[in-house]
Amino acid sequence: MEQIQPDSQYFDFIEHHIAVVVPSYQVADRVARVIESVPNYIRSIIAVNDFSSDDTGRILDKLAETEPRLLVIHHESNRGVGAATISGYSQALELGAELVIKMDGDGQMDPSHFPSLITPILSGEADYTKGNRFHNWRFASSMPFIRKFGNLGLSLLIKVASGYWSIFDPTNGFTAISSQTFREINHGALKKRYLFETSMLIELYDLPAVIHQFPMDAVYDDAPSSLSILDSLFRFPPYLVKSFIRRFVRKYIFQDFGAVTIFVFGGIFSLLFGVIFGTYHWLQSIVSGAPATAGTVLISAVPTILGFQLLLQALVLDIQNDPGGSR
């Protein structure tokens, strides 16, 4: 990629200390182009070599000899993209950065989108910004089908777990965060590997932080995804269920015991009663050969329908409580 030249926003950005963190693992053939593509208004570049076995570390060290903005961190073991990003964030804060962009070292993130990441944070409209590859179908059409299907499914599950219903493409790692926001989140709860972006959203909800997203192209080449389907199936659901329960307890029991809480507990009780009562009498009718009476059917059906409606209303209220869209 060619070095981006100053434009009308250059002089606005150059006044601020903006850092770019580049977590890098096995990207010897691409990382140089990524570093060279970082615009001149970025004051600090922190590349984190996550114990690559190829020449990634050597290439980064060589680049640092001629690029004064570049600081290279070497992990002594492979700790995962989340751990690499956290190392970079921490170093950026030590350097005094006001805002930190995460840009992977594989060359799939276009630095021409930096203004879309930076502007909402510097203007005070957002605490965290991210890309969305599904905003426009034309953008998403270049994504391989298996990744597209997996991202769509995960997006729905992560919406439920995180509470950010307006946020899509939650596993997208092209993000930016204000330094103040990063200081406030629970660093110990952030996942160190593939769940990093998801855990970031879940921890941001506790602040709560305002999130903006922008449309971006889905750029893919022949490189295989580092996240396997089986890994996603086994790792994501248990974490998301646990995160949802934690969010519900914190938000709707300890912080805001109200309509959502009543609807959830009332809905669960009513639904369970209707299903259990109906199942019991259905089995009884099979054994005895006598059909259930109309009254028995009503006693089962009414609580079941009521429970479903109460849970649906709780879901609607939770969506309305999404903190992500505006300040």
Image (cartoon, grey):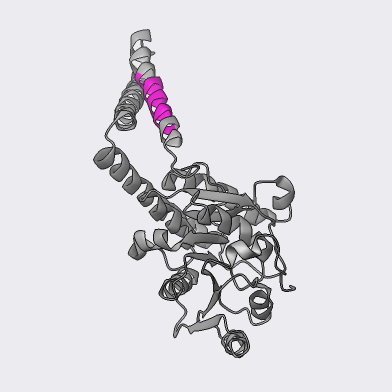
Please name the residue shown 47% across and 74% down the image.
88
What x and y, as percent, mark residue 271?
35, 27
Q: In this orientation, does residue 185 appear?
A: no
Left or right: where 13 falls relative to 245:
right
Compared to residue 295, the image places residue 138 above or below, namely below
Read off the magenta span. 303-315
Nearer to me, 232 or 85: 85
Residue located farthest toward the left when viewing the structure as drawn:
254
What x and y, as percent, mark residue 316?
45, 30
Q: Is residue 153 magenta?
A: no
Q: Is residue 304 magenta?
A: yes
Image quadrant assignment for residue 300: top left
Please name the residue shown 75% across and 73% down the image.
2
Q: Total of numbered circles in the picture?
A: 0
Please name the residue shown 62% across and 86% down the image.
63
Compared to residue 20, the image places residue 275 above or below, namely above
Image quadrant assignment for residue 69: bottom right
Please name the residue shown 70% across and 61% down the image.
219
Nearer to me, 46 or 283: 46
Kindly report the secondary structure that dominates the magenta region of the rendered protein.
helix
What x and y, as percent, mark residue 20?
55, 70
Image quadrant assignment for residue 290: top left
Residue located farthest toward the top when viewing the structure as drawn:
294
Q: In this orientation, does residue 174 appear?
A: yes
Left or right: where 206 falls relative to 19:
left
What x and y, as percent, mark residue 167?
53, 46
Compared to residue 311, the image places residue 185 above or below, namely below
**Quadrant in which the N terminus appears:** bottom right
